[in-house]
Amino acid sequence: MRCPRFIQFSFVIYAASLAPVLGLNSCINSSANSAASSSDSTSGTGSGSSATTAYVYVADQTASSGPNQIVAYAADANGQLTVVTGSPFSQDVGSMAANGTNLMASANTQPEINTYTIGSNGALTLASEFNYAPETGYRSTGCGDISGLRFDRSGQSLYGDVFNINCSSNSAIASLGVNSSNGSLSYLGNVNIGYNSSGAIAFLGNNDFAYSAFQGIYWTVLSFVRASNGNLDFNSTFTTVSPIAAPPGSTPGLVRGYTPGFTATDTTNHVAFAEFPSFTVGGAAPPVQLAAYTADANGDLSTNDTYATMPATSVRTPIDLEMSPSGTLLAVGGIGGLQIFHFNGGSSVTSFTSLLTTDSIAQVAWDKSNHLYAITLTGHAYGSNSVSPGKLHVFTVTGSSATEAPGSPYTIASPVDIAVQSE
């Protein structure tokens, strides 16, 4: 599950009003301004000689009040970054996702999703633009915007969070088909998820089911079924997930236990949730903990975890959970830092690292060569949690160690989104 995205962040905004109970800090999705120097897109550029293992794309507000350009890097085997020729690519975009041959990006100034062809050196060429306004009821007044782009596991279906679809005050998840020959998009449909829900979906290994979680007084876990053409709809037989019970002696809040917030999935049939406590212990809110669930053939979820088996995260307010390509490592980023855990399928999550950085993290992404990338929260909207100028951290992570890569962190004026394409 990736951030920053409007639906994902909406739960944190709402939870701010419950801070005495939940112990959460407020967080607002923003591409807020940050002063940029002329060297922002090249600061900390590496000079590694190893073959490229991944291309890293960051949507960055490179100039104060300017557009979000795409800064592109090539990562070598050590995780060291070199700026791609032609970077930054100048079109004004927000959310991004890559599927191997194409980078998709939501335009900021019009209701379009851009398709870029990824060149052999990582350079981007605009291939097509898809106008989604007729399907989402887009209005310049704040209806029908698509953001939060992500692919399914096949890379042939693209999904986006629709804000205020058809000016209905509800959110939706839009499904789009990808033409494998040229990357052009076609609209498949949308599923209306209501007002208090999250469109930040994560797919099971079988690519048939997806899940999202929304934390707050109206907390919910949603399950979706992916049709053969890629269209997403509700899993009509899904059994509601019950909250994990609070420990004995706790003082209940609005919910008697933990409420799932953010979601990630492994390569088979297991789901990780960030579990937010809706209770206090001795007058204080305990930390967010991590639970592991198993999905059955119908997509229903079950867990053996309790308050005693879930590890606590040192990240004060998780914002993004991302599973490694192997499905064995779980990265947790958010207000207060970045931390990695061992993910053990249906068994409980176990501790691995302490905080890798205390910089507040907006979004994380993995490549397939043991590298983890993380962009920081930036802008005045985040207050004391903001990192200005922004940073792009790179870590080399194996099952036994996690170290910052050479040249990391890199200065990024005001990063708002990241996408990684492994080679």
Image (cartoon, rainbow, N blue to C red):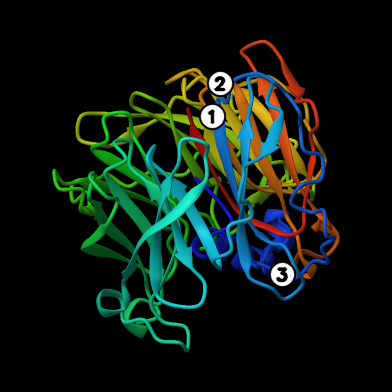
The amino acid pointed to by label 3 is Ala
Residue 188 visible here: yes
Spatial separation of the CA atoms under disc 2 and disc 1:
6 Å
Residue 162 x %, y %: 39, 68
Q: Residue at x 29, y 36 (%)?
A: 154
Residue 293 x %, y %: 42, 30
Residue 405 x %, y %: 75, 25
Q: Residue at x 26, y 79 (%)?
A: 134
Residue sitting nearer the eye, 418 or 77: 77
Residue sitting nearer the eye, 210 or 403: 403
Q: Residue at x 45, y 48 (%)?
A: 97
Question: Does 144 appear above or below 236?
Answer: below
Residue holding disc 1: 367
Say whether disc 2 or disc 3 marks the residue closer to the N-terminus: 3
User: Which of the 4 quarters of the picture holds residue 286?
Assistant: top right
The amino acid pointed to by label 2 is Ser
Q: Which mark is residue 177?
A: none
Are circles 2 and 1 on residues that touch, CB within 8 Å? yes
Residue 52 x %, y %: 57, 26
Please state if 245 lies on the left or on the right of 47 as rendered: left
Please state if 124 lies on the left or on the right of 45 as rendered: left
Residue holding disc 2: 369
Residue holding disc 3: 32
Say whether disc 1 or disc 3 marks the residue closer to the N-terminus: 3
